């Protein structure tokens, strides 16, 4: 478990590998299966998730600690976080479109998808649950984001291979993808307890 | 009691109002001026993002057109109708070019072609071509492992039961994706009106060509001698039609002893299959 007195690197490692958001926590599986058809789209989605997650956690951490805690409104956490994340994804989309057109073209179609991505909300919640400070929250979120990136890109690589393999008809498509994902998840379970995490 | 309701309502309400204001302001600040022509051009394009125009998707091409960096007739899929609409938007004259369709220059199915070995690897033409050049004895034969079929986004090319890829000319949009997918370079673009075609890519000399396939071009030059328009020539042991000169008189189709030259429009059933002309030709052993 994450605690406040852990080092930054351990926090990062825990978020990325040991408690991988996709393969251990099983959060955001919709995009994990939906976008992982090709390497190119998964890399795009992975970077977009890392980017949005960092922004969303920063803002929602500030909202939580400087708005909800003083007014003693902790039960409004879910509603206010959803509001915050939806707003800031919109804002980021506009900003990127104006400032970095090539990045927008590469990432643009994934940004609206991320609004409804539960991993972003999960990361924002987890840092609150672990009671982390802002810097540690950001490191943790970075780890979650790269964990997502890492898992989806590996999965896309395997899926590109299984698409070519002779698989019996009843297993083609999603069934074999689910089996692949479950085996990957089992492999990641091997990291459980690493460094006492 | 009233405060217990009022405070959360106010906090969340103000948060919402603040975010809404922020979005409204940034919508103005970060507004991107989009050329209205760009959207019109984009709407005139098929939107399949096939990349046959040489740009990254339909948006890339539309941007190039609006910036007058690309001609109005660059979209192969949209053809003349898209070119006319884009020309109208851009206020320039449309120069049409005839639509092209893909053609697979092999119709030697499993029952006529010969094989060197049994291939049991990955069902993909690239993979098969890497392994000793594929299982077909003819180094230019269609491997029939559906790489082109998978590359096609328009469901226009299919490997038939004989194991040879055949283009559905009605569905083919000329995007050239299958051309790039073929490791044998068997697929090339022909004008849509051109029906007389040489369905072979074999560059072997006559004897060797006959050994590997019953319907290969043996470079006998009968077509070249009989052509009234000087439109067909044997180049590097393979008959090649000059589409600019060919009048599609069908003389070469009738004279070809190997039935290699075909008329796509007249005998569509012959393409890629083992219809009677092949059976009438030199039989196997």
Image: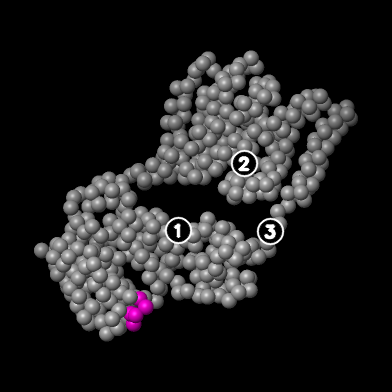
Asked if labels 1 and 3 touch by Cβ distance under 8 angstroms, the answer is: no
Q: Which residue corresponds to mark 3?
A: B34
In the rendered structure, find residue B153 and report the number of the disc placed on it. 1
Neighbourhood count class around disc 2 (C-alpha, 10 Å): few under 14, some 14–19, many 20 upward? many
Neighbourhood count class around disc 3 (C-alpha, 10 Å): few under 14, some 14–19, many 20 upward? few
Residue placed most toward the observer, A31 or B82: B82
Q: Quadrant of residue B242?
A: bottom left
Mark 3–mark 1 Cα distance, whole angstroms, equals 29 Å
Q: Which residue corresponds to mark 2?
A: A114
Q: Chain of mark 3?
A: B
Which residue is at a point 51% across and 66% down the rendered structure image?
A: B75
Which residue is at a point 47% across and 22% down the rendered structure image?
A: A191
Residue A133 vs B221, above or below: the answer is above
Q: Mark 3 or mark 1: which is in front?
A: 3
- Are the numbered discs 1 and 2 placed on the same chain, yes or no? no
Magenta-colored span: B243-247
């Amino acid at each position: 478990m994450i605690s406040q007195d852990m080092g930054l690197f351990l926090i990062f490692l825990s978020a990325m590998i040991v408690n991988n958001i996709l393969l251990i926590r099983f959060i955001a599986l919709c995009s994990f299966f939906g976008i992982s058809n090709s390497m190119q789209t998964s890399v795009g989605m992975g970077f977009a998730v890392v980017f949005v997650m960092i922004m969303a956690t920063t803002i929602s951490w500030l909202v939580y600690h400087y708005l909800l805690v003083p007014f003693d409104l902790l039960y409004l956490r879910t509603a206010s976080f959803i509001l915050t994340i939806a707003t800031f994804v919109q804002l980021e989309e506009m900003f990127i479109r104006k400032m970095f057109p090539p990045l927008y073209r590469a990432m643009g179609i994934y940004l609206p998808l991320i609004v409804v991505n539960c991993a972003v909300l999960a990361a924002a919640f987890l840092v609150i649950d672990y009671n982390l400070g802002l810097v540690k929250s950001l490191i943790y979120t970075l780890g979650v984001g790269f964990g997502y990136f890492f898992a989806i890109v590996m999965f896309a690589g395997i899926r590109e291979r299984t698409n070519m393999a002779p698989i019996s008809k009843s297993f083609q498509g999603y069934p074999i993808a689910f089996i692949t994902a479950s085996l990957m998840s089992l492999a990641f379970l091997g990291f459980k307890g690493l460094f006492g995490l | 009691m009233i405060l217990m309701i009022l405070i959360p309502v106010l906090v969340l309400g103000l948060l919402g109002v603040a975010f809404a204001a922020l979005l409204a302001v940034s919508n103005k600040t970060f507004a991107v001026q989009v050329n209205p022509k760009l959207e019109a051009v984009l709407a005139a394009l098929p939107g399949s993002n096939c990349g046959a125009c040489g740009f990254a998707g339909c948006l890339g091409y539309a941007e190039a057109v609006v910036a007058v960096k690309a001609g109005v007739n660059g979209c192969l899929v949209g053809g003349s109708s898209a070119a006319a609409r884009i020309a109208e938007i851009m206020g320039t004259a449309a120069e049409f070019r005839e639509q092209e369709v893909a053609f697979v220059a092999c119709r030697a199915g499993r029952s006529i072609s010969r094989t060197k070995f049994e291939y049991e690897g990955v069902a993909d033409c690239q993979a098969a071509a890497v392994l000793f050049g594929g299982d077909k004895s003819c180094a230019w034969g269609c491997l029939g492992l559906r790489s082109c079929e998978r590359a096609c986004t328009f469901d226009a090319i299919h490997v038939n039961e004989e194991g040879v890829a055949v283009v559905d000319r009605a569905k083919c949009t000329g995007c050239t994706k299958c051309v790039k997918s073929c490791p044998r370079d068997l697929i090339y673009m022909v004008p849509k009106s051109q029906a007389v075609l040489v369905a072979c890519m074999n560059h072997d000399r006559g004897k060797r060509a006959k050994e590997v396939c019953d319907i290969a071009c043996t470079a006998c030059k009968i077509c070249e001698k009989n052509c009234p328009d000087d439109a067909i020539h044997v180049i590097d042991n393979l008959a090649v039609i000059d589409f600019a000169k060919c009048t599609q008189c069908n003389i070469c189709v009738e004279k070809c002893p190997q039935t290699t030259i075909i008329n796509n429009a007249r005998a569509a059933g012959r393409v890629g299959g083992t219809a009677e002309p092949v059976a009438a030709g030199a039989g196997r052993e």
